[in-house]
Amino acid sequence: MSKKIRVAVLFGGKSAEHEVSLRSAKNIIDAMDKEKYDSVLIGIDKTGRWLPSAESSLLLSGSKIDSREAGNVVAMIPQESGKIIETSSKEKQDYVDVVFPILHGPFGEDGTVQGLLKLANVPFVGAGVVGSAVGMDKDVMKRLLRDAGILVAKFLVFKKHQINTIKFNHIKKELGIPFFVKPANLGSSVGIFKVHNQKEFKIAIEDAFKYDNKVLLEEFIEGREIECSVLGNEKPVASVPGEIILQHEFYSYDAKYLDENGAVLKIPANLPKSIIKNIQKVAVEAFEVLCCEGMARVDFFLSKDNRVYINEINTIPGFTSVSMYPKLWEETGITYTELIDKLIQLAIERFESESKLKTSLY
């Protein structure tokens, strides 16, 4: 029997999406083929500490971690091909063959961890540094998509030092009413507001700038919310699309994760074949334009006249019990366990391909 592949599931993190990450990690660990893979838990608490296995298990279960263990952390060693140590004791060493980062939002989905894993010389699931960074930054993402001829909603961007120059009447004239206010770098609808009047606008701007130093103001597209999953490296493929039928005014954090009746997921979406093909085509195009690899979920607005707008791309989509990414692949014919297997194998294939590239002139 061949040796099992040791997969480090990296979860938690400093972002506002910490709790979502815990739910995703549990599902990935449960779905992993136990005959092929051994899971190694590496939890990151809200202060950014990388925790040893025992403390990671506590974090995953929601238990409180003893503050006396605060100095007991793990580190991944650069250029040591997956070697990890407990910093409190150099004797406590371990290794992993591949890393599955399931860190939503900043400090995990934005290229920071991906850069660290590249330095550590270990394969990892999902997009690399560039794809992660541009996929996280809604401003950069939308400009790249727009320049590629892919439809996006009209948007304006402001940085924190410009906060006093953001005038409601000007935004109303440019974008119409209602419009959205979003932190440029965040996910799971954290810090997002749908604005109808000046009072809501003031609250929305102040709250969005709590999460990021750059804020996106975006036109409201009236239509259906459609999502499509993408899988692959050089030859990515798209799943059947699904539809989110909202019971809230928009797909907020509460609607996604707290209110079990917040939205109805229609999988597959009830759409004509021509529109399904177009959505799948645009999903793959966006995946490639934004330099993504491994996996991504592409979120669309389908207008009343059947125009397809991309809302955003998620390079580390959710894997919770209500998450669309795995559900869409299940409907397409790939089980949860098969999906995890494919993602790990894609990570290893990319690593092996990149390992053949020259890194020196001599």
Image: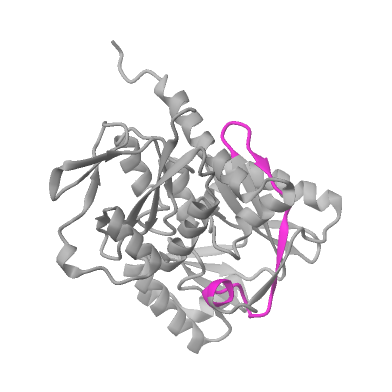
Find residue 323 and report its horizontal and vertical position in percent.
59, 62
Find residue 324 and report its horizontal and vertical position in percent.
63, 59
Above or below for 123 versus 326:
above
Q: Residue at coordinates 57% horizontally, 71% vertically from top-left?
A: 256
Residue 149 in view here: no
Q: Residue at coordinates 56% horizontally, 67% vertically from top-left?
A: 218
- Which stretch did the figure color magenta? 232-257
For the C terminus, which image quadrant? top left
**Looking at this view, is 236 or 8 the one in front?**
8
Q: Residue at coordinates 47% horizontally, 28% vertically from top-left?
A: 2
- Outermost residue to the bottom: 199
Above or below for 80 versus 260:
above
Q: Is residue 170 left or right of residue 335?
A: left
- Outermost residue to the front: 1
Colouring convention used in this rendered image of the protein = one colour
Q: Is residue 164 left or right of residue 156?
A: left
Query: How many numbered marks does the figure carry?
Result: 0
Residue 311 found in image quarter: bottom right
Find residue 200 and report its horizontal and vertical position in percent.
50, 85
Q: Is residue 196 left or right of residue 270?
A: left
Q: Is residue 320 left or right of residue 249?
A: left
User: Is residue 196 found inside the magenta-colored segment of the image?
Assistant: no
Residue 197 found in image quarter: bottom right
User: Is residue 239 found inside the magenta-colored segment of the image?
Assistant: yes
**Looking at this view, is 179 or 42 the one in front?**
42
Find residue 229 and report its horizontal and vertical position in percent.
64, 50
Residue 233 in view here: yes
